[in-house]
């Protein structure tokens, strides 16, 4: 009788690291362990790294386990037959869900006489979970990626919160307690696969009976497909030749991922994961990974020295959600002063602070004490010291005139009941030559205010939407010029997520002063 341990979880959660660390720990206990990697591509970066640490490794390529069920079974059978293993750990591709119905229950039904299927484990990255949670706290509509993430957590027998070493201990306890409350049927454990801390709690959870095996997900396959479509994936092989005296495979991979990270941060792209292996002619190799836009690549294995040639394999899953990150972040420059209107939990504040560097400054404005407290904790965790959090409203910004170079905001302005005051305040606090780049919901000109209201309440970030013409007129009225409104994604019939840009002319201060709070246009 063999034991099969299925892992799922969003891209970048550390499933491969978890699988490898767990396999080594089980081997130390006397078990004979094999692992199976999985992706839509046919050249898997993860497989190379795992094979450097474990003897029994297989892969299922060209699709997820639910679509390649027979290939998964064949891989299990082959590993048992050739390597005499008694335990198989398999990680599903990070954009897959509904594995209870498509993999776990069929394995128990058809192969239960020969196989014990352990509880389905969803590996969770705490920072990714907190990012999705912050969006919900700000009242944003649930994105398709967040929907996919929620389904993966909902179907778990075991919720395995990895990378606990990346957040503070009190935040970790809060997160684990919250997950236990919201997922009462699941066993919730926390650990770090990289350091091995508390990994035994995960191994113990696999010995317990499944507690959520009867869950039935009501999958919206249109949303599932939309999330898959957003996660554009790339699998490439590259032949590398040094121009002169050899190249460092580790440095090359680090540079490529660093450029990708900067590009993603600049363009509002969400990195699910990006992984590179570079193998040199003598069989040595480097492997690095990236799971966060604007983050630093993680070194999983370093090459030992320079080489004249090499072969690189790149696996990347990257999503671009235009309304997930303020458009102006892409244009931020070092040393600038930024204001985030309705800063919520502080995610965009933190990203902006990193972009403007130590010589710049970012103000985060929110009127809720709870959001300011959450943002303060997140800023502290992120270790950025160029952030100032302000309590106040966007209709009366508590800053002097001509203070900020850039204003950003995410689906906040349309919630205001006094939009002229908001626009006047933006013009007042912008420096001459300053600019705004905001994400908002904007209506087509054909919709009347009544028709907009029919499509949703203020909590859905829809009913208070301005039309394109109204947006441009209000910006022009306060002296903000060259306004453009670019639709990015349909939110409802005639209503769209949009990027709005405008700037304050260098020689223009009159309109802003005339429209200060209490002025003629308020």
Image (cartoon, helix red, strand yellow):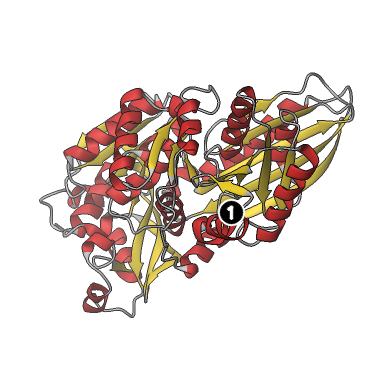
Q: Look at the picture and state if 374 lies above or below 320.
A: above
Residue 291: percent from left, percent from top: 55, 39
What residue lies at 50% left-to-right and 27% top-to-bottom?
A: 199
Q: Quadrant of residue 275?
A: top right
What residue lies at 22% left-to-right and 66% top-to-bottom?
A: 457
Q: Could you tell me if residue 480 is visible in this image?
A: yes
406 horizontally vs 202: left or right = left
Q: Look at the picture and state if 353 lies above or below 36.
A: above
Q: Look at the picture and state if 109 lies above or below 275.
A: below
253 and 343: which is toward the camera: 253
The N terminus lies in quadrant: top right
Count of numbered circles in the view: 1
The C terminus lies in quadrant: bottom left
Q: Could you tell me if residue 507 is visible in this image?
A: no
256 horizontally vs 168: left or right = right
What residue lies at 70% left-to-right and 34% top-to-bottom?
A: 50
For disc 1, the marked residue is 112
Residue 247: percent from left, percent from top: 82, 25
Residue 213: percent from left, percent from top: 44, 54
Q: Residues within 10 Å of mark 1 (few under 14, many from 20)?
A: some
Residue 312: percent from left, percent from top: 78, 38
20 and 396: which is toward the camera: 20
412 and 45: which is toward the camera: 45
């Amino acid at each position: 009788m063999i034991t099969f341990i299925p892992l799922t979880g969003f891209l970048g959660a550390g499933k491969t690291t978890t699988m490898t660390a767990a396999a080594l720990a089980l081997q130390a206990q006397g078990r004979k362990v094999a692992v199976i990697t999985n992706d839509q591509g046919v050249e898997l970066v993860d497989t190379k790294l795992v094979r450097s640490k474990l003897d029994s490794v297989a892969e299922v390529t060209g699709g997820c386990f639910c679509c390649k069920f027979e290939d998964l079974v064949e891989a299990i059978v082959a590993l048992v037959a050739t390597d005499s293993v008694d335990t198989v750990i398999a990680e599903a591709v990070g954009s897959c869900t509904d594995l209870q119905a498509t993999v776990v229950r069929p394995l128990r039904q058809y192969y239960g006489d020969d196989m014990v299927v352990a509880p389905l484990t969803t590996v969770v990255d705490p920072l990714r979970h907190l990012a999705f949670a912050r969006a919900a706290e700000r009242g944003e509509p649930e994105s398709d990626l967040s929907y996919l993430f929620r389904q993966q957590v909902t179907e778990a027998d075991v919720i395995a919160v990895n990378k606990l070493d990346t957040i503070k201990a009190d935040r970790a306890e809060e997160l684990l307690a919250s997950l236990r409350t919201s997922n009462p049927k699941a066993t919730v454990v926390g650990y770090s696969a990289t350091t091995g801390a508390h990994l035994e709690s995960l191994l113990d959870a696999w010995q317990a009976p499944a507690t959520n095996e009867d869950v039935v997900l009501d999958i919206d396959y249109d949303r599932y497909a939309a999330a898959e479509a957003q996660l554009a994936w790339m699998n490439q092989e590259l032949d590398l030749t040094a121009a002169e005296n050899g190249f460092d495979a580790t440095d090359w991979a680090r540079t490529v991922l660093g450029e990708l990270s900067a590009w993603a941060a600049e363009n509002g792209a969400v990195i699910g994961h990006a992984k590179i292996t570079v193998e040199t002619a003598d069989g040595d190799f480097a492997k690095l990974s990236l799971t966060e836009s604007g983050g630093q690549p993680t070194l999983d294995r370093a090459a030992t020295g320079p080489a004249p040639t090499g072969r690189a394999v790149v696996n990347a899953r990257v999503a671009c959600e235009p309304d997930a990150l303020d458009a102006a972040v892409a244009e931020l420059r070092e040393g600038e002063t930024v204001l985030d209107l309705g800063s919520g939990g502080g995610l965009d504040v933190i990203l902006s602070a990193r972009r403007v560097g130590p010589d710049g400054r970012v103000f985060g404005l929110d009127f809720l004490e709870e959001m300011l407290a959450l943002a303060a904790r997140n800023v502290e965790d992120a270790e950025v010291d160029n952030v100032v959090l302000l309590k106040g409203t966007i209709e009366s910004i508590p800053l002097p005139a001509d203070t900020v170079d850039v204003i950003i905001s995410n689906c906040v302005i349309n919630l205001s009941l006094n939009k002229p005051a908001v626009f006047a305040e933006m013009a007042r606090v912008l420096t001459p030559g300053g600019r705004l780049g905001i994400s908002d919901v904007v209506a087509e000109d054909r919709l009347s205010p009544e028709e907009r209201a029919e499509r949703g309440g203020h909590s859905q970030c829809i009913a208070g939407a301005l039309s394109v013409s109204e947006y441009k007129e209000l910006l022009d009225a306060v002296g903000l010029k060259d306004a453009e409104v670019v639709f990015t994604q349909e939110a409802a019939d005639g209503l769209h997520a949009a990027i709005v840009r405008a700037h304050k002319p260098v020689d223009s201060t009159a309109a802003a002063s005339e429209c200060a709070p209490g002025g003629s246009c308020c």
